[in-house]
Image (cartoon, rainbow, N blue to C red):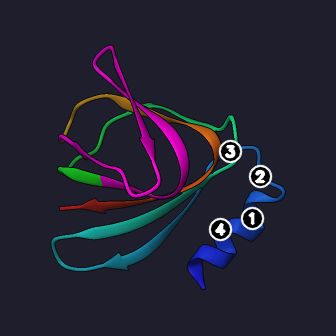
Amino acid sequence: MIVKEIKEQLKTSDKPVAKSFHTGNKFKVLLFGFNKGMKMEDHTAKHPTKLLVLEGDVIYHQEKQDTRLKQYDEIEIPANVPHSIGALKQSLVLLTQG
């Protein structure tokens, strides 16, 4: 039901909606929902992360380079490297950390 919760919260949110999907001893899986135009500003991850676009169209920015990711595209995010994500349309992304 987590995807449904994210989509419902996005109806009234002005920022991305994040939920924990699954957590273990050495990993974490997160879901992020974005409305068109929403952005997660520069931040870093403490652990190597893989981002998978489940729905939508996003721009991933890292080290002066933009990568457009559409449904089912994925990208590796190194630990401790500043990056940001912006939504070109309503999007849902899955992040696996650890």
- Three-letter amino acid code of the residue under disc 3: Lys
Discs 3, 4 touching: Cβ within 8 Å: no
Distance, label 4 to label 2, CA atoms, is 10 Å
From the viewer's perspective, is 64 left or right of 2?
Answer: left
**Residue at 74%, 58% in the rendered image:** 10
Distance, label 3 to label 1, CA atoms, is 10 Å
In which quadrant will I find the N terminus?
bottom right
Q: Quick one: SS at disc 4?
A: helix
- Three-letter amino acid code of the residue under disc 4: Ile
Q: Quick one: SS at disc 1?
A: helix
The magenta span reads 51-78
In which quadrant will I find the C terminus?
bottom left
**Residue at 51%, 40% in the rendered image:** 58
Q: Position of residue 80 (x, y in %)?
A: 21, 35
Depth check: 25 or 4 in front?
Answer: 4
N-terminal-most mark, 4 or 2: 4
Q: Position of residue 54 (x, y in %)?
A: 47, 62
- Three-letter amino acid code of the residue under disc 2: Ser
Q: Which mark is residue 92?
A: none
Q: Identify residue for label 1.
A: 9
Q: Identify residue for label 2.
A: 13
Q: Position of residue 72 (x, y in %)?
A: 39, 58
Q: Identify residue for label 3.
A: 15
Distance, label 3 to label 4, CA atoms, is 12 Å
Q: How packed is label 2: few (under 14 Cα within 10 Å), some, or many (20 or more)?
A: some
